[in-house]
Image: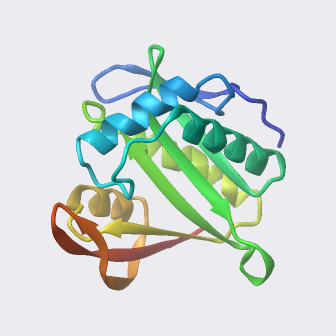
Amino acid sequence: MNFEPGQIIDRFHSKKNKEIILKIPKMGWEKQYQSFINSIIAEDDYIIYDESLDFEDENKFIQSELDKIKDKKGFCLTAFYQDEIIGGTTIDFGKGRKKHVATFGIAIKEGFREEGIGTKMMEILFEYVKRTGIRLIELEVFATNKRAIGAYRKMGFIKHGELPRAIYRKGKFVNAILMNKNL
């Protein structure tokens, strides 16, 4: 399946009846991506970044995601509410003897969590990657992020390990929970 930058993949209503539009990323959205990711970094949510990202960082991110989509090495969805980016998910396909494995990540902006947006994004993303030959999806999550761990379990992920002291957040070391889902 071929995708075009900016292509609408789905429209749906969140649990709070907000119309959400899922799109393939596109160049020109750098400022919106920058605002989105920096808002999550600023709230010090469960995100690996601890410093603001600039326009050039987002330019490289979008180009990299578009290249992965074009080369069938990954996939990325961007969630919009009105004209604002409120969520994003990426999946990177493995290579060689791990080409059946993909690594997954997702972020939803404060004020839009627990509305079913992340669940819908995962359903669409996983349905697509299943058709590419991916059979196993892996992720890493902060051990203290109970909301995300619960959401991943709801989507069929199981814990297969824990990496002690993998993340340094708010002056403390936090374990990383390793999870996977068979497709």
Residue name at image x 59 percent, y 48 percent? 125
Q: Residue furthest left?
A: 171
Rendered location of residue 61, percent (x, y): 61, 44
Rendered location of residue 94, percent (x, y): 70, 71
Q: Vertically, is 23 above or below 81?
A: below
**Quarter of the view holding residue 159:** bottom left
Nearest the eye: 81 or 12: 81
**Quarter of the view holding residue 55:** top right
161 relative position to 111: left or right:
right
99 relative position to 119: left or right:
right
Q: Vertically, is 56 above or below 50?
A: above
Q: Confirm whether residue 174 shows in the render.
A: yes
Question: How many numbered marks, from 0 up?
Answer: 0
Residue name at image x 30 percent, y 32 percent? 112
- Rendering colour mode: rainbow
Nearest the eye: 53 or 119: 53
Q: Residue furthest top?
A: 82
Q: Vertically, is 82 above or below 168?
A: above
Rendered location of residue 71, percent (x, y): 84, 52
Q: Confirm whether residue 11 shows in the render.
A: no
Residue name at image x 49 percent, y 40 percent? 88
Q: Quadrant of the N terminus?
A: top right
Q: Quadrant of the C terminus?
A: bottom right
Residue name at image x 49 percent, y 36 percent? 54
Rendered location of residue 115, percent (x, y): 30, 35
Q: Vertically, is 109 above or below 99?
A: above
115 relative position to 34: left or right:
left
